[in-house]
Image (cartoon, rainbow, N blue to C red):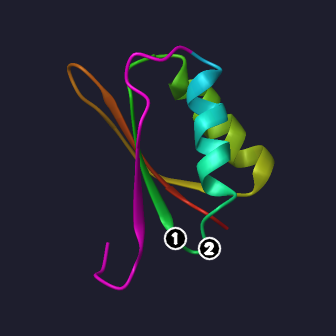
Amino acid sequence: MTDNQVKHSLDVSGHKCPLPVMRLRRLIVNIKIGEFVELKATDPMTLIDIPNYCRETGHVVVNVTEGDDCILYLVKKC
């Protein structure tokens, strides 16, 4: 991630699907193409739902990091 790339943060910890996808969708429509969203989630179902949402809408999951207490996603709006 370079300094000139805009990154937005979204913490959906504690929320169960479909709320993480709905909140990501609400944020991503308001950012510019090429910008990034860093999403923090705790629901393991997001490992299925977030990539599916991105595939269906044309956005890209750049990175997924599974930690002990959360899952971090880096999503690029395309």
Instruction: Residue under label 2, please give it.
Output: 32
Q: Which residue is mark 1?
A: 35
Q: Residues within 10 Å of mark 1 (few under 14, many from 20)?
A: some
Where is the C terminus found, in terms of image quarters?
A: bottom right
Q: Given the current orientation, which residue lies at the most extreme left position?
A: 68
Query: Badge 2 local density, few (<14 within 10 Å), some, or many (20+)?
Result: few
Rendered position, 3 above or below 13: below
Instruction: State the extent of the magenta-drawn residues as a range.
Output: 1-16
The three-letter code of the residue at mark 2 reads Lys
Looking at this view, is 26 or 2 the one in front? Answer: 26
**x, y percent for residue 46:** 53, 25
Residue 3 falls left or right of residue 7: left
Query: In the image shown, does 38 or 47 lie closer to the viewer?
Result: 38
Question: Residue 58: horizontal and vertical position, in percent?
Answer: 74, 57
Tell me whether circle 1 and circle 2 mark residues in contact (CB < 8 Å). Answer: yes
Left or right: 47, with 13 as reference point: right
Q: Quadrant of the N terminus?
A: bottom left
